[in-house]
Image: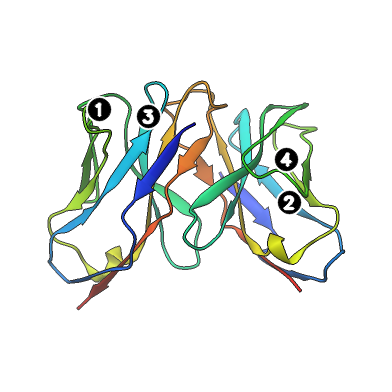
Amino acid sequence: GNSVTQMEGPVTLSEEAFLTINCTYTATGYPSLFWYVQYPGEGLQLLLKATKADDKGSNKGFEATYRKETTSFHLEKGSVQVSDSAVYFCALKEGDAGNMLTFGGGTRLMVKP
Amino acid sequence: NAGVTQTPKFQVLKTGQSMTLQCAQDMNHEYMSWYRQDPGMGLRLIHYSVGAGITDQGEVPNGYNVSRSTTEDFPLRLLSAAPSQTSVYFCASNELGYRDEQFFGPGTRLTVL
């Protein structure tokens, strides 16, 4: 079956630090990959996505590249802000899985001023 | 568009009580789904629907029932609540394509005593 593994948090950084959150996946076919963000007390919002190998998703200064050879989709940001404090979820979706998402366990990011 | 709405926002039940979590979307999406979020486990799929009159089980369906009588609504029923069902519940909807993002509701925080 499909699975997604994320680095455990919490990750605590100072403002303007570089961020990497690792994500690796196992899938039977060719999934689409997603990063979702959950701000305190809210639902999940799509942050970025990539639908095929070597695609780079980007949004709000965050980036992630779909690496089929390493089955990875690591999230990066060059300079984090306090407002980036949230829980980040890596997820995949395959067409033969009812189009439902398989999520990683989530990584909490805390950014201090 | 209101997007995906969920009611109630918070609920406390006693063991053995029943209740229905409501979910509605106004985006005319065919796919709707219910997830539960537990610490360190990400979101796990409970049930999903690929259209009115069609539902199927996800990863953790036991103790939950669903129905889909209209495109807009997808209620989740707990027939006899148990403490193990204490969780945050998210409803989501999406288009048919597997590359498309899922849109999430704000969540319902359920506590079963």
Q: Chain of mark 2?
A: B
Q: Is residue B18 above or below residue B69?
A: below
- Residue that badge 4 annotates: B73
Q: Are marks 2 and 4 in contact (CB under 8 Å)?
A: yes
Residue A18: x percent and y percent?
A: 13, 60
Q: Tell which subunit mark 4 falls on.
A: B
Q: Are marks 1 and 4 in contact (CB under 8 Å)?
A: no
Disc 4 residue crowd, few under 14, some 14–19, many 20+, Cα 10 Å: some
Q: Secondary structure at mark 4?
A: loop
Q: Is residue B25 left or right of residue A108?
A: right
- Same-subunit check for callouts 3 and 4: no
- Residue bearing the label numbered 2: B22
Instruction: Tell me if label 3 and label 4 are in contact, CB under 8 Å.
Output: no
The answer to which image quadrant residue B17 occupies is bottom right
Residue at x 54%, y 24% (from the top left corner)? B96
Distance in Å between CA atoms under marks 1 and 2: 39 Å
**Residue A105 coordinates in the image, percent (x, y):** 43, 53
Which residue was labeled with disc 3?
A: A32
A102 and B20: which one is in front? Answer: A102
Residue that label 1 marks = A68
- Tell me the distance, in whole angstroms, between the alpha carbons under discs 3 and 4: 27 Å
* Three-letter code, disc 4: Asp
Mark 2 surroundings: few (<14), some (14-19) or many (≥20) residues within 10 A? some
Q: Position of residue A113 (x, y in %)?
A: 19, 78
Tell me, yes or no, whether dots 2 and 4 are on the same chain: yes
Between disc 3 and disc 2, the foreground one is: 3
Q: Nearer the viewer, mark 1 or mark 2?
A: 1
Relative horizontal placement of residue B49, taking residue A42 as reference (left or right): right
For label 3, count other residues whose C-alpha is less than 10 Å away and answer few (under 14), some (14-19) or many (20+): many
Q: Callout 1: helix, strand or loop?
A: loop
Q: Nearer the viewer, mark 3 or mark 4?
A: 3
